[in-house]
Amino acid sequence: MNEIMSEDEINKVSMQIILHAGDARNQISDALEKIGDQKFEAATDLLAAAQENIKKAHESQTNTIQAAAQGTEIPYSVLFSHAQDTLMTIMSEMNIAKQLIRLFKRVDFKEE
């Protein structure tokens, strides 16, 4: 007989994903402000912290998906779908922020 993940368990995992992804979003937002101020080292540090939060969120998601692949029945959850969508969006924001640092470092800013 297959194990069944409870609704409470999937909600708990979902909230962990949302929590860590949300923390990463805040750090990425702060990093984008630093990029605009040409404070690239501070932006890079913030993105490194955001990456750690993304990693934590991704691990929670991956563990759940692996459990399903191993036969654990995972109930459908709108909250889990939202959590996955949130994580994917934050990962995209991270990729854009990394590219912005690379591009902004190439620009010669001159005060007018």
Image (tube, helix red, strand yellow):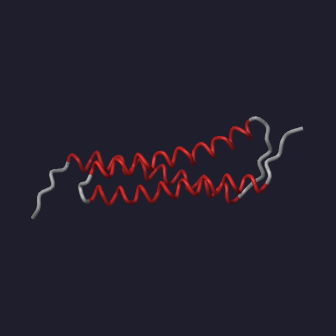
Q: Specify the farthest residue to the right.
A: 1
Q: Specify the farthest residue to the top.
A: 70
Residue at (57%, 57%) from the top-left corner?
19
Query: Nearest the camera: 47 or 92?
Result: 47
- Tell me residue 55's x, y (percent): 53, 44
Query: Nearest the camera: 60 or 92?
Result: 60
- Tell me residue 45's x, y (percent): 36, 48
Residue at (56%, 56%) from the top-left corner?
86
Q: Specify the farthest residue to the left.
A: 112
Query: Nearest the camera: 22 or 91?
Result: 22
Q: Is residue 89 left or right of residue 59?
A: left
- Tell me residue 2's x, y (percent): 85, 39
Q: Specify the farthest residue to the bottom.
A: 112
- Tell me residue 47's x, y (percent): 39, 49
Residue at (41%, 55%) from the top-left corner?
28
Location of the N terminus by quadrant is top right
